[in-house]
Image (tube, rainbow, N blue to C red):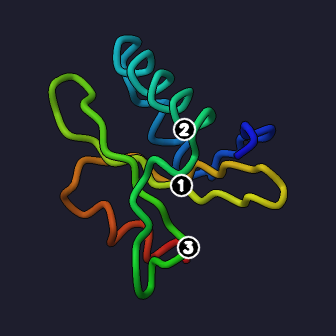
Amino acid sequence: MAKVSTVLQTPLFRKTVKKLKPNQKKELDAAIKRLIVKPTLGELKKGDLAFLRVYKFKMSKQLTLLGYSYDDGALTLELIALATHENSYRNVKRRS
């Protein structure tokens, strides 16, 4: 498996990241770097969200979900959503 060459952000993701504190951004950056190296770390969803992978990690001692899609053909990682577990899938469904 090759390393991701392009990382894209949706407006929803960008808006959420803007509200994070510096220490939270560092933890998010570390999680994104892990995904760039190994984009299949996240769990592939089923049904309406079949396009989505979710990577779970701790940010400020709270479980956080990073929703993304990965296109192996173009080696592109698209960052879709960042949220705590509550309501995270509902927000992504609205986007699709």
Residue 23, placed above or below residue 42: above
Q: Nearer the viewer, mark 3 or mark 2?
A: 2
Q: Nearer the viewer, mark 1 or mark 2?
A: 2
- Of 9 and 56, the residue lying toward us: 56
Dot 2: element: helix
Residue lying farthest to the right in this orientation: 74
Three-letter code, disc 3: Phe
Q: Are marks 1 and 2 in contact (CB under 8 Å)?
A: yes
Task: Indicate which disc residue 35 carries.
Answer: 2
Q: Give the Cα distance between marks 1 and 2.
A: 10 Å
Indicate the quadrant containing the C terminus: top left, top right, bottom left or bottom right: bottom right
Q: Earlier in the sequence, mark 1 or mark 3?
A: 3
Can you identify the residue that label 1 sits on?
68
What residue is rendered at 48% in x and 34% in y? 17
Q: Give the Cα distance between marks 1 and 3.
A: 9 Å
**Rendered image quadrant of residue 87:** bottom left
Q: Is residue 37 left or right of residue 4?
A: left
- Of 69 and 88, the residue lying toward us: 69
Task: Judge the density around disc 2: few (<14), some (14-19), many (≥20) Cα neighbours within 10 Å.
Answer: some
Three-letter code, disc 2: Leu
Three-letter code, disc 1: Tyr
The percent coordinates of residue 74 (x first, y second) are 84, 56
Dot 1: element: strand
- Of 54 and 89, the residue lying toward us: 54
Dot 3: element: loop
The percent coordinates of residue 58 (x first, y second) are 24, 31
Task: Indicate which disc residue 93 carries.
Answer: none
Task: Indicate which disc residue 51 carries.
Answer: 3
What residue is rendered at 61% in x and 33% in y? 37
Residue 74, placed above or below residue 13: below
What residue is rendered at 19% in x and 58% in y? 86
Q: Earlier in the sequence, mark 3 or mark 2?
A: 2
